[in-house]
Amino acid sequence: MLDHNKLLRRFKLERIEDASGVSGIGEVAVGVEVFDKRCYLFWLGDHTSHNEYNSIEDVEFLHGHQGRTLIVWLD
């Protein structure tokens, strides 16, 4: 049986340095990790979008930019 208190964990992407010049710095995206480890990411700013990833490791690999963007857990 699933623990409904653990169905999701919220996080945000905090960009320290904008290597591409597109997203800016600070809080650039928010997301949730659901019970099966998939993550849904919602980009903030003028050009919003959303993406689905198989894991938080995939989010970090694709958007971490060698430590220039941090995953900050909110839950």
Image (cartoon, rainbow, N blue to C red):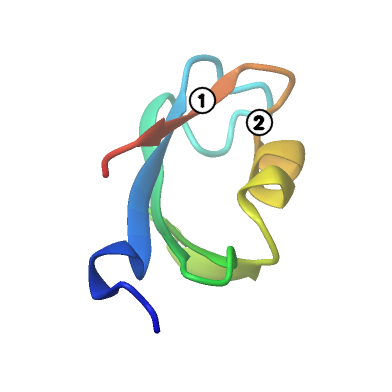
Mark 1 neighbour density, 10 Å: few (under 14) some (14–19) many (20 or more):
some
Query: Which of the 4 quarters of the picture holds residue 43?
Result: bottom left
Measuring 65% from the left and 48% from the top, which residue is drawn there? Answer: 59
Could you tell whether 33 is left or right of 8 in the image? right
Label at residue 70: 1
Tell me whether circle 2 and circle 1 mark residues in contact (CB < 8 Å).
Answer: yes
Q: Where the N terminus falls, by quadrant? A: bottom left
Residue that protrudes farthest toward the front in the picture? 1
Measuring 61% from the left and 70% from the top, which residue is drawn there? Answer: 52
Circle 2 SS class: loop
With respect to residue 75, does 21 lie above or below?
above
Quick one: label 2 or label 1, which is nearer the N terminus?
2
Measuring 38% from the left and 41% from the top, which residue is drawn there? Answer: 12
Measuring 55% from the left and 25% from the top, which residue is drawn there? Answer: 69
Can residue 52 be seen here? The reply is yes
**Three-letter amino acid code at disc 2?**
Gly
Mark 2 neighbour density, 10 Å: few (under 14) some (14–19) many (20 or more):
some
Which residue in the protein does label 2 denote? 64
Circle 1 SS class: strand
Can residue 45 be seen here? The reply is no
